Amino acid sequence: MRITQNMLIRNNLNYISNNYERYGEILDQVNSNKKITRPSQDPVIAIKGMEYRSQVVEVEQFQRNLGEVYSWMDNADATLDETTQVLHRIKELTVQASNETYTADQRNGVAKEIKELQSHLEALANTKINNKYIFNGTNTSTKPVDIANIGKSAADIAAGTGGNFVINYDGKQFSFDNETSPNVFVFKNGDKEITIDNSTNQISLDGNAIEEQEILISDAKSISTNQENFEIEVMKGIKINVNIDPQNVFSAEMFKDVSDLIKALEEPSNKATDINAFLGKMENHFDKVTAERSDLGARYNRVELIQERLGQQDTIAKKTMSDNEDIDFEKAVTDLKIQESIHRAALAVGARIIQPTLMDFLR
């Protein structure tokens, strides 16, 4: 096969061009710190990179969600702590006022302080974070407690609409179901029902008569009826309830008992035994707050474990993404130097191969 001068020149230029292209690719890798700068360079790396990047973004979003979880839980725990302090103070004042040596004026002074504490309990129940009420389940735009409308009578139901009221009995909340006949109202909680017959002035639970003093009738908007948990997703498929059950802590019974205590203190004819009767009720509400705070603490511990797990996932996901996309910088610099040397050598060899032609002598 005859090798012409043009063939040598053409082949040499092709090799130089290929070397220069490879040199450019390595230079792009060094500048970008990535194995590829276009998906066409390696579709497999590009597709895997999209998957790994989505995983990293997902983990980072869950970590941001955890920040909101901590905000809700920390504020809820701080509020419950302050609530226990308020209830403890009310209990102390009740013990003091149950002393027979206390005069009517002194008990009035105690009643005034408890009234202020009751208002503070209402403010705690209506705690807001980022303009959201944290103790009203998923209904974060409506305040959960309005003590002005707690404690109505059966006559109020007859005068109004049944759906505007709720009934609390034995720690359970009964919502309006229907009006079976004029002045007969039915409130239900699961399979149990309370019937108020204003025509005969009778109240019954599943057909058994009960006294009006045993139930607590309130305006439906005066106390939270939302029992849906406010949940935030912290891992794929895992949601954490960041709220507490407001019915267990800021219940209508608690505000009613505090109001009754204030009335008992303001009544001059009441004796120490009448005041002392409220101690058990205050202790019961105190225990409910403590139990709810304990439940919140258990969930808080789980959130901390999830945070640790997310930290591990974040590290693994970023390492996997880096292994897929990032270059070995030391190797890339070495390859760049080698390619540069090859390119220089190709240029030098090309200069020797391209010999002078007859036209060079004829000039």
Image (cartoon, rainbow, N blue to C red):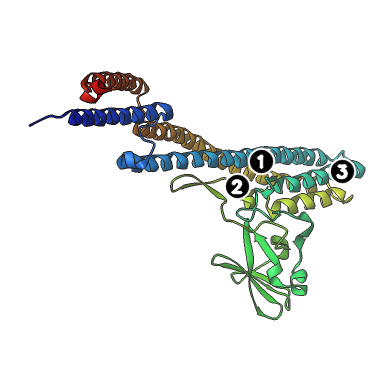
Check disc 2 and give the amino acid type: Ile
Q: Which residue is mark 3?
A: 107
Alpha carbon separation for disc pair 3 and 2: 34 Å
Determine which residue is flagged by label 2.
244
Residue extending farthest to the left is 1
Residue 276 is left or right of residue 132, and the answer is: right
Residue 340 rendering spot, x and y as whole percentages: 32, 21
How far apart are the two marked residues, 1 and 3, measured between alpha carbons?
28 Å
Near-viewer residue (24 or 206):
24
Give the amino acid at mark 3.
Arg
User: Mark on residue 80?
Assistant: 1
**Location of residue 249 in the rendering, given as x and y in whole percent from the top left corner:** 65, 48
Pointer 1 with pointer 2, Cβ within 8 A: yes
> Can you say which quadrant of the picture contains the C terminus?
top left
Give the residue at x 77% y 69%.
Answer: 156
Secondary structure under badge 2? loop
